[in-house]
Amino acid sequence: ALTINPATLIISGSKTYDGSRSFTSTNSTLTISGFLNGESLGAGAVITATANSANALISTNYFNSVNWTAGTGSNIALASNYQVPTSYSATNNVATITPASITITGNKSFDGSATFSAGNTVVGGLLNGDTLASATASNINVVANGSNYFTTFALANGGVASNYQLVSTGYNITNNAATINRQLITPNYSVLATRTGQSTYTIMSVDLYGVPGMAANAPATLTYSSVVPMN
């Protein structure tokens, strides 16, 4: 008996991450070659292909199925005469998914950290129920406002952060801006002083509590409400 095996096609495609393994003529760029005897898919053919993984930046991602609805014209290829490679091949089966772009803006009070929680951010562009866990700014200080931006981020509930990229890799007021506000505090001073008169004291040292990330500086003047002598 004579057996004719399907010829192997060359397929490649690229798209932006959308959470699915499906590549179509509308959401991606698909290229199929390797047809024999002058055959083609015909004018207006509709191609669909399914990748092995839906995630972005998988260097060995490949297509494990491809289908098409033939277009018009002569010498149209029969799908049963062809097959796709069964595994990744850099030369004849490559599926490329690039990260989707997202925006992050954030606003919080100074706390000595570059990390913003999800509750202090506004995110745009996440897909398929993905949510932000945290984002990290390039600077922890209030003085950086107007140029501070987010450099990295993490997703909640097992989301894959590499499926996304920031629209701007630097500061942008509308799509990548981190704002840190001055924190309102009530300082609490602990003072060590030497009595130099009936009601005058010479300040020896000052400790300042309740100000995160800041060291104490002795004030030029100090008003006290009570004095506790040290034995």
Image: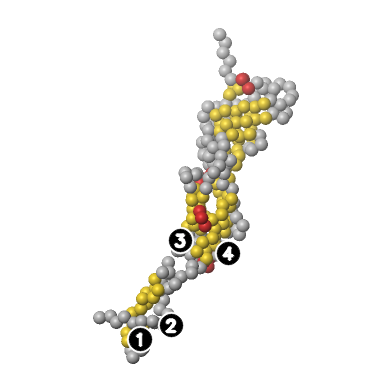
Residue 106: percent from left, percent from top? 54, 58
Query: What distance separates the C-alpha of mark 3 from that of mark 1?
Result: 38 Å
Per the rendering, the mark at residue 146 is 4
| Residue at the (50%, 64%) spot, across then down | 109
Per the rendering, the mark at residue 91 is none
Circle 4 or circle 2, nearest the eye = 2
Q: Is residue 154 above or below residue 31?
A: below
Q: Residue furthest right?
A: 73
Q: Is residue 54 left or right of residue 200?
A: right
Q: Quadrant of residue 78?
A: top right
Circle 3 or circle 1, nearest the eye = 1
Query: What distance separates the C-alpha of mark 1 from that of mark 4?
Result: 44 Å
Sequence order check, earlier mark of 1 and 2: 1
Residue for badge 1: 201
| Residue at the (51%, 29%) spot, across then down | 87
Residue for badge 2: 220
Residue type beneath disc 3: Ser
Residue type beneath disc 4: Gly
Residue for badge 3: 113
User: Callout 4: helix, strand or loop?
Assistant: loop
